[in-house]
Amino acid sequence: MDTGSHESMSFREGIDRMVDRASLAIGLNPETAKVIQACNAVIQLKFPVGIDGNVEVFTGWWAIHSAHRLPAKGGLRFAPLVNQDETEGLAALMSYKCAIADIPFGGAKGGLLINPGDYTEDQLRKIVRQFTMELARRDFINPATNVPAPDFGTSSREMAWIADTYKALFPDDVNRDACVTGKPLNRGGVPGRTEATGKGVQYALQEFFRHAERVADAGLSDGLSSQRIVIQGLGNVGYHAAKYLAEEDGSTIIAIIERDGVVVNEDGLNVHDVRQYLAETGGLKGFPAGNYSAQGEQALEMECDILIPAALESQVHAGNAMRIKAKLIVEAANGPVTYQADEILRERGITILPDIFVNAGGVTVSYFEWTRNLSHMRFGRLQRGLDELRGMNYLAALESLTGKQTPENLRREIMRGANELDLIRSGLDDTMRMAFRDIVEMLRHHPNISDYRTAAYAIAINKMAQSYYELGLAEPL
């Protein structure tokens, strides 16, 4: 996949330019803008690990963009192209994302320069444990200050290894489970975390389509069930977003782009089947229920209603932005549209729902997991039985007043108390809904702002500026 070779600025510089644009639109003091943009701290670690009798030296980073609220929260990325600029840029995105979603975290990001596929599970466990120890020695992992989560190349497995290592280092820390989120369920994780970012993409689109005037402004019509969607990336985020949009909203997934190319079916792809084929063969070539092409990047330019880049950053860039034909771009990945491409697409009138809003589902449910770990109690434990009793009483009153028996399926639903997954998804849905409505309000009431990205950044930097002002680090708004 192209990572933005057509651009004249780095990934982090592009994010800073987007912040500059929003700061100018709302008249933010330039000195305050500098405070907001600055990366508070970044550490580079080089550490040796013995692998099959040889010693390899690994390089990793942890960047804290903002500590105006603690802990600083961010994903831990394992990839062969990780670097400090990318890590700092992604940490900045996390700060703005948390502000948009009203999550009381600062922004951080971690990265390890590694291709996980080159190592066995035992070797990876050894590398992760050593990386965790290096971070912990410098207090760059702690339930109160720095809390990693899964990202590209990592999963609940790596988070369990991190949590186990931290527990061994700090056995007396009663809140040790909260040192990392995205853990397996039996290790302090919460249901719904794995699919949280993809589910958040679905909730973001559902809320967008509740605003008929916004849908019309994007050149779209009807509801989600009428939309033809192209997905780039069938990893954790892309898979769950595509799956829920197809199965629950009736959208048609006409193309799926992966590393080795693209598979297309204008009548709609079965997302589960594509994912299973990808897992079995390592690629899309030969998938029987679609037409394969090795030209995956060109598929970004297909005719479609909605394009969802859910892979890596800088996939839509100055070199292809003029050829994008989607009416709506939904940024499920971090930074998939570069600053220069964003300028081109805005000029062309193509609507973009920005990453700092769309993919906030992961950090939202991470917040739920972190608070659950601190409370040492599952969600719903105190009120579920009460909810069930209230449902029984409501049902008995209804049947007494009507003299009719309630159908069994409806009876079960009324009497059922909300379980932990119900509560987490309710909270995620509410977060995405309210965040979009805040963005719409910013667009309505600020004449200098006409696009969703600038509106989202304006909200985020307003909130951060207020926090810095309260700390005496910035001038009043």
Image (tube, rainbow, N blue to C red):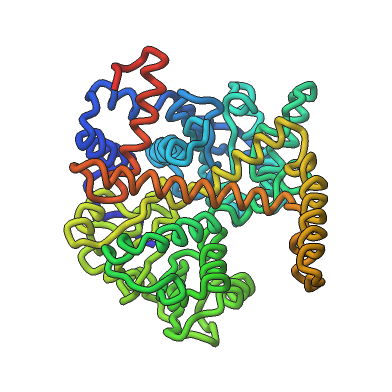
Quick one: 473 or 137, which is closer to the camera? 473
| 32 relative to 270, above or below | above
Residue 112 visible to the viewer: yes
Residue found 75% across the figure and 63% down from its top: 413
x and y, in percent, of residue 113 in the image: 51, 43
x and y, in percent, of residue 461 in the image: 34, 32
| 251 relative to 239, above or below | below
Residue found 70% across the figure and 47% down from its top: 190
Residue found 29% across the figure and 66% down from its top: 216
Residue 10 visible to the viewer: no
Quick one: 275 or 441, which is closer to the camera? 441
Residue found 78% across the figure and 50% down from its top: 390
Drawn side of residue 343 relative to residue 101, left or right: left
x and y, in percent, of residue 201 in the image: 48, 57
Quick one: 315 or 199, which is closer to the camera? 199
| 376 relative to 152, above or below | above
Q: Identify the image quadrant of the N terminus.
A: bottom left
Quick one: 93 or 119, which is closer to the camera? 93
Q: Identify the image quadrant of the C terminus.
A: top left
Residue at the farthest top position: 472
Where is residue 470, by image quadrant?
top left
Q: How many marks?
A: 0
x and y, in percent, of residue 354 in the image: 36, 51
Where is residue 476, by image quadrant?
top left
| 461 relative to 345, above or below | above
